[in-house]
Amino acid sequence: MSKHKIYSMSFVKVYPHYVTKAEKKGRTKTEVDEIIRWLTGYNQEELEAHLEKQTDFETFFAKAPHLNPSRALIKGVICGVRVENIEEPTMQEIRYLDKLIDELAKGKAMDKILRN
């Protein structure tokens, strides 16, 4: 079975869409970055380096320093699929991020988004 095309897509191609989605709803790039750092364990400099290097999604998540164990608390539907039921690990990580950005755009408080 071939890999989904998003795995080879550069993270920096999608990142501006995350930021735009958040900003359209009165949220900030800083909040988007905080969510990404929370999920992956990257610090801001590492995140920016991956954006600059145009790292693909698969590598971005594979090299994440510390995937947050609380990400298992992320539940709900994204693109018509329940994120907690996705069996392919990389796709689940991508959809976790999509779900968190959706929650941000819907006005959810950061402490709830970050499962505090």
Image (cartoon, rainbow, N blue to C red):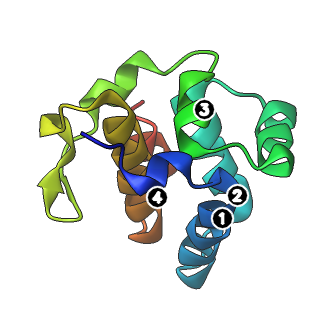
Which sits earlier in the primary sequence, circle 3 or circle 1? 1
Q: Is residue 81 left or right of residue 38?
A: left
At 52% from the left and 80% from the top, the residue drawn is 25
Image quarter (top left, top right, bottom left or bottom right) of the C terminus: top left
* Residues at marks 4 and 2, CA–CA distance in whole angstroms: 15 Å
**Of residues 61 and 39, the one drawn nearer to the viewer in this rendering:** 61
* Residues at marks 3 and 1, CA–CA distance in whole angstroms: 14 Å
Which sits earlier in the primary sequence, circle 2 or circle 3? 2
Q: Is residue 45 left or right of residue 114?
A: right
Residue 78, given in percent of the width and then of the height, sits at: 24, 59
Image vertical order of residue 97 relative to residue 60, above or below: below
Q: Amino acid at mark 1?
A: Lys
Image vertical order of residue 4 relative to residue 73, above or below: below
Q: Amino acid at mark 2?
A: Val
Badge 3 marks a residue whose secondary structure is helix
Residue 16, given in percent of the width and then of the height, sits at: 67, 69
Please name the residue that numbered disc 1 is placed on: 13
| Few, some or many residues within 10 Å of mark 1 (<14, 14–19, 20+) | some
| Few, some or many residues within 10 Å of mark 2 (<14, 14–19, 20+) | some
**Residue 65 visible in the displayed image:** yes
Q: Is residue 28 left or right of residue 78?
A: right
Badge 4 marks a residue whose secondary structure is helix
Q: Nearer the viewer, mark 1 or mark 4?
A: 1
* Residues at marks 2 and 1, CA–CA distance in whole angstroms: 4 Å
Badge 1 marks a residue whose secondary structure is helix
Image vertical order of residue 90 relative to residue 48, above or below: above
Label disc, if present, on residue 101 of the rendered structure: 4
**Of residues 85 and 102, the one drawn nearer to the viewer in this rendering:** 85
Please name the residue that numbered disc 2 is placed on: 12
Q: Nearer the viewer, mark 3 or mark 4?
A: 3
Label disc, if present, on residue 59 of the rendered structure: 3
At 83% from the left and 44% from the top, the residue drawn is 53
